[in-house]
Image (spheres, helix red, strand yellow):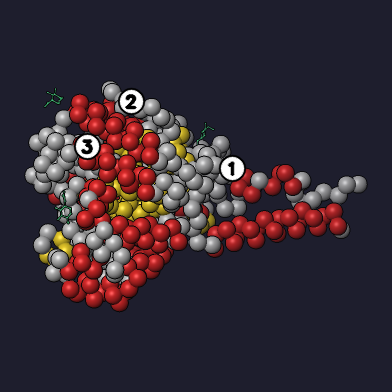
């Protein structure tokens, strides 16, 4: 009795531990962070995925937005509740180099801009911050984020406080009217030093969106290397994040020439990608073509760095959260497909639902904001659900199945994955519950350890499971310019069908839609990405690693 109870008890304990690990809120990873080839990793060597929200603190008031709307701790808790583990907190160089400005109390900073209502709002929501100098307000925001176990990346957005970015704002490139390299280096050092012992400050972005008439590749290398060295000398813990040219749309010059630094294991690159980065492609073109071309373009501009073994942080992606901007909706689904395929580190623009003042407009509504204008609700709750899987790592070092990754069939439109409910029913469900698929070299979609595979029977029918032994597996090709249509020819008569998810999540094999030309046709129900995952699979013994507990079920010793 006793000998067979022990493994049972241990198993029970393990299950309880697993269950409670799921229930607790996020914790900070083992810090400091560093890099291992293309991955950002914790001090324990495990992958740490940056899933960040950008929080602006660089506009004219030089204070984090929203302090007049909600208490700072509540905002930080909200970031965590939405599943983000990190905030990209922006600052203007003057906050670190101009003591007249940095010592200005928040109340005066708002009053000098005529923002009386904001003063009243801060008095109600954050009375303790109202009379603090701006630099201390900034520190308090970082500390509130620490209380919610949120990592912080400090992003030098501008030299002068104000909305960023235009080609002619004098903040675009080294040598521009307000962009003195010496002052910038001084500011970076001061900021890095200030947060030297602040654990949750894990990275510093040297400068947002370099741009304008003074852009110059050789000066980029000169000053970015100096900036990286200055930050690292002042604070060797932080990741040093370098942004590209043309509003951080391109790092293509790095393809043939690397930066040279005195240190290793801390360098990360960052790239921005918005729908408007692609001109009017998302309106004018067939959506498959637009996505195919856009992905090829970001590949040559920056994604290639992952292959070269450098971490690349998509530090600004964003879209109109109202859901009514069709080109943005299309771009977003395309971005989500890439984020799933490459398991990207990323930051959304933006957290703030509104600004104290932006471009001269009081209480400016941020249509790209995660939060509503009043900072009380999520502007687009379905988006938060859709990105849930993309907020945690499924590839990289230290995951439960790093040695035996499997494929999942990801559906970018919903953020869900294809799950087998029964041999005759495949449905979309949480990717964490995905079956372990293998997309084989012969183009079959086989369920590991089961002898079963995906089979298309006829047009308009639900997708079914066949068996490998009866040779009924369909051969699935990834077609169209997006390569996201998962398609096969029916053995019966050669008709081509595509996997399709109905609005209630049932997977069928339907006629392929929108493959070419028509720019109005929406193919997204038929877009899937076969992705690689090393996450634990529920119900798989490999996840619990039971073998070390002895044979299971326990065998009698006689
Ligand atoms: C420093 O900031 C103050 C307050 O914003 C401003 O009036 C002053 O011009 C700034 N000084 C410099 C050198 O930019
Ligand atoms: C870039 O800057 C370097 C160094 O100042 C200069 O020699 C070169 O001519 C510049 N290139 C362009 C295209 O302006
Ligand atoms: C799929 O199966 C092949 C052959 O057994 C194996 O080499 C490959 O690693 C598997 N891939 C995945 C993702 O499971
Ligand atoms: C092939 O079979 C399907 C029924 O599964 C039918 O809808 C389709 O018209 C057939 N195509 C041809 C070319 O016969």
Q: Earlier in the sequence, mark 2 or mark 3?
A: 3
Q: How many marks?
A: 3
Q: Earlier in the sequence, mark 1 or mark 3?
A: 3
Please name whichever residue, 372 or 291, is drawn nearer the observer in this view of the structure.
372
* Mark 2–mark 1 distance (CA, rounded to whole Å): 48 Å
Judge left or right: residue 231 versus residue 323.
right
Please name whichever residue, 268 or 549, is drawn nearer the observer in this view of the structure.
268
Where residue 150 sits: x, y (%)? 42, 56
Residue bearing mark 2: 260
* Mark 2–mark 3 distance (CA, rounded to whole Å): 20 Å
CB atoms of marks 2 and 3 within 8 Å: no
Q: Is residue 349 visible?
A: no
Residue bearing mark 3: 182
Where residue 69 sits: x, y (%)? 28, 71
Please name whichever residue, 80 or 262, is drawn nearer the observer in this view of the structure.
262
CB atoms of marks 2 and 1 within 8 Å: no
């Amino acid at each position: 009795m006793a000998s067979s109870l022990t493994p049972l008890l241990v198993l029970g304990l393990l299950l309880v531990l697993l269950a409670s690990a799921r229930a607790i809120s996020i914790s900070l990873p083992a810090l400091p962070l560093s890099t291992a080839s293309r991955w950002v990793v914790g001090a324990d060597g495990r992958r740490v995925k940056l899933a960040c929200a950008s929080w602006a603190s660089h506009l004219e008031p030089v204070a984090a937005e929203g302090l007049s709307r909600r208490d700072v701790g509540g905002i930080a808790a909200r970031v965590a509740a939405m599943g983000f583990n990190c905030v990209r907190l922006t600052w203007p160089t003057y906050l670190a180099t101009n003591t007249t400005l940095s010592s200005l109390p928040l109340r005066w900073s708002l009053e000098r801009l005529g923002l009386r209502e904001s003063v009243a709002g801060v008095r109600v929501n954050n009375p303790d911050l109202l009379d603090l100098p701006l630099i201390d307000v900034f520190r308090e925001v970082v500390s509130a984020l620490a209380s919610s176990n949120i990592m912080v990346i400090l992003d030098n957005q501008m030299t002068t406080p104000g909305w960023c970015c235009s080609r002619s704002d004098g903040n675009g490139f080294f040598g521009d009217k307000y962009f003195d390299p010496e002052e910038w280096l001084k500011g970076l050092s001061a900021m890095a030093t200030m947060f030297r012992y602040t654990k949750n400050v894990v990275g510093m972005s040297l400068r947002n969106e370099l741009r304008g008439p003074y852009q110059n590749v050789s000066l980029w290398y000169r000053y970015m290397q100096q900036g990286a060295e200055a930050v690292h000398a002042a604070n060797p813990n932080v990741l040093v994040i370098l942004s590209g040219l043309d509003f951080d749309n391109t790092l293509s010059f790095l393809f043939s020439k690397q930066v040279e630094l005195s240190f290793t294991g801390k360098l990360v690159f960052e790239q921005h990608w918005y729908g408007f980065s692609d001109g009017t492609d998302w309106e004018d073109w067939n959506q498959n073509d637009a996505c195919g071309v856009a992905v090829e373009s970001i590949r040559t501009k920056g994604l290639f760095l992952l292959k070269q073994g450098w971490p690349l942080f998509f530090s600004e992606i964003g879209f109109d959260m109202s859901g009514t901007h069709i080109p943005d909706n299309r771009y977003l689904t395309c971005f989500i497909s890439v984020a799933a395929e490459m398991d990207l580190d990323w930051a959304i623009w933006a957290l703030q639902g509104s600004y104290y003042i932006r471009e001269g407009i009081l209480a400016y509504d941020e249509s790209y904001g995660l939060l509503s204008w009043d900072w009380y609700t999520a502007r687009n709750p379905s988006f938060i659900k859709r990105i849930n899987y993309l907020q945690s790592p499924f590839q990289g070092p230290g995951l439960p199945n790093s040695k035996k990754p499997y494929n999942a069939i990801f559906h970018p439109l919903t953020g869900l994955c294809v799950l087998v409910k029964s041999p005759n029913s495949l449905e979309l469900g949480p990717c964490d519950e995905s079956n372990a698929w293998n997309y084989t070299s012969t183009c079959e979609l086989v369920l590991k350890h089961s002898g079963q595979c995906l089979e298309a029977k006829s047009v308009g029918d639900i997708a079914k499971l066949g068996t490998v032994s009866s040779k009924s597996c369909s051969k699935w090709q990834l077609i169209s310019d997006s390569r996201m249509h998962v398609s096969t020819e029916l053995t019966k008569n050669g008709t081509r069908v595509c996997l399709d998810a109905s609005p209630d999540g049932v997977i069928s094999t339907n006629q392929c839609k929108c493959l070419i030309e028509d720019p109005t046709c929406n193919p997204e129900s038929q877009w899937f990405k076969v992705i690689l995952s090393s996450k634990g699979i529920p119900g798989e013994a490999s996840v619990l690693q039971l073998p070390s507990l002895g044979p299971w079920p326990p065998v009698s010793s006689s």
